[in-house]
Amino acid sequence: MKKLTSIFILALAVALVATACSSGDESLDGRTVSVGVENLYPPFNYIDEDTGEGAGFDYDIWREICSRLDCTAEFAEAGWPAVIEETGQGAYDTAADGISITDERKEVVAFSDPYMTTIQKIMVRVDETRYADSDAFFASGDRLGTQVGTTNYELAASLTDEGNIEAYESFPIAVLALLSGDVDGVIIDDVAGQGYLGEGSEGVAILDGDLQSDPLGFIYAQDSDLIEPVNKVIADMKSDGTLDDLITKWFVEFDA
Amino acid sequence: MTTIEPVKSTDPTPPGAKLTFDWSDFPWWFIGIVLTVAFPIYKVLTDENWNEGFLFIKDGITLTFSVTIGGFAIAMIVGLGLSLARMSPRLIPRNLAIYYIELIRGIPVLVTIIMFGLVIVPWFFNLVGISLQSTIGSKAIRASVAIGLIYAAFIAEVLRAGIESVGVGQREAGKAVGLNGRQVFRFIVWPQAIKNIMPALGNDLIALLKDSSLVSILAVRELTQMSRLWTGRSFQFFAGFMILAAMYLTLTVSLSMLLQWYERRIATP
């Protein structure tokens, strides 16, 4: 009897989803949407050790978006920060990499509505005792690592002397430099930092003190026809709780 | 009946020869290089964005030069030691030298730089308790040493070829006039060897200058890293990398011409 009930509920759910889909006036008619990802920015996007496949928040959210819009998400590996320029030129239909929405970038690409907000923080070695919070870190004038071409770099440059900042190729290298002592802190988005806490890097901790909060968006070429339909899906996902579930899955519970 | 004056066809320099110019000898390629560099220079002089980019990127030249010069000096010293060990009749030095040369030549330059600069040296310095943020541990030094140790393997083989190119008769003559082994090497073999391998050494110097761009992976602020920093905030990728390429091209072509001039100067008449 219990089994029958669950089958009934399942059937109902399927019917509901089906109506939800058909009621939406936006459909991309099964076309392929190429999504640029870096695969070096866990938990947004990275290569899963077990499967060898790309995984992360960006993969899940774009598969979900495409399932609602009738499209196929095809992920392509792209370099940061060149992916912004490339997407502006149409090399990818969109790109997802925890990209902060800024006015400078808006001159190159169009942004989606923000799907989440991150807070920039300072990551330090776990045995660090010199800094009470991020203000104390900047007061010390110690060396700070980050990734080239990020809002983290721009923020760091506004808070400390640029000579104190080391701009690495990717975030994993910046964290490596932190662990080995090349730098004493890494300025990082809290959600990405959370990824490193769970990623088996027991060696890092995050200092108290929020620096700046950034809304994140997907990027497109300026004239893209994806902007409106995807914004609508983002709004739907916010209201039906799907987005919160994905954020919880990747940025709260994540432990690769 | 031979009233016609014989033509002096055998005269190697007929009158007026110096006035004719053989256009097929003209260095057209050089005009091409100049024009290629002229475009970014023109843009830098006239376009505000390009100008800003150049002013930002040019500061990287100090580190590009120091990595190149420091790296080449290390490569020459270590390379000389390696080449001598490589030619040693003794088993252990010879095999150690061959091991090192094959090891370096078998690993891509970029991989060696990452290994050395981001993994091995940090591990070792932490082990012996030297701060990576001290002068000796600085990444500029790590970058120069990494490049130097890599090119030492290449230069060792060039030096060996040079030293072996000096005939055994030269050494015997040196010994005959009473020089010891060290003096024979210093005054007889070395000057001739260097002269023979100048073109090959020059090639390695230019290749080293170009490979210095790879140390940008260590976040060392040489030219390439500076252009990445600038394009990362301005998104002027076209301008940034055109300026960068033009700067490298100017450096390498000038260096190549300087080396050719020097080769002619020291050439045996």
Image (cartoon, helix red, strand yellow):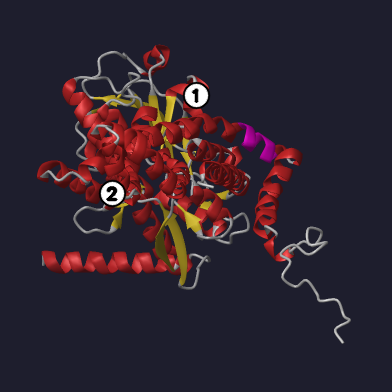
Percent from the top left, x then y, of residue A83?
49, 51
- Give the magenta range: B49-55
Seen from the viewer's position, the closer of residues A227 and A42 is A42
Q: From the top left corner, tell me how far across and down residue B16 is, in percent.
A: 83, 61
- Tag shown at residue B169: none
> Which residue was labeled with disc 2?
B168
In the picture, measured across the screen, residue B239 lies left or right of residue B232, that is right
Measured from the top left, where is residue B248 in percent x and y?
Answer: 55, 44
Name the residue located 10 percent from the left edge and 45 percent from the top edge.
B91
Kind of residue at disc 1 = Glu
Q: Is residue B83 above or below residue B186?
A: below
Q: Are marks 2 and 1 in contact (CB under 8 Å)?
A: no
Closer to the camera in the image, A45 or A181: A181
For the residue pair A197 and A239, the one nearer the viewer reads as A197
Residue A166's image quarter? top left
Considering the numbered disc 2 on the image, is that residue within a helix, a strand or a loop? Answer: helix
Please, what is the three-letter code of the amino acid marked with disc 2?
Val
Q: Is residue B51 magenta?
A: yes
Q: Residues within 10 Å of mark 2 (few under 14, many from 20)?
A: few
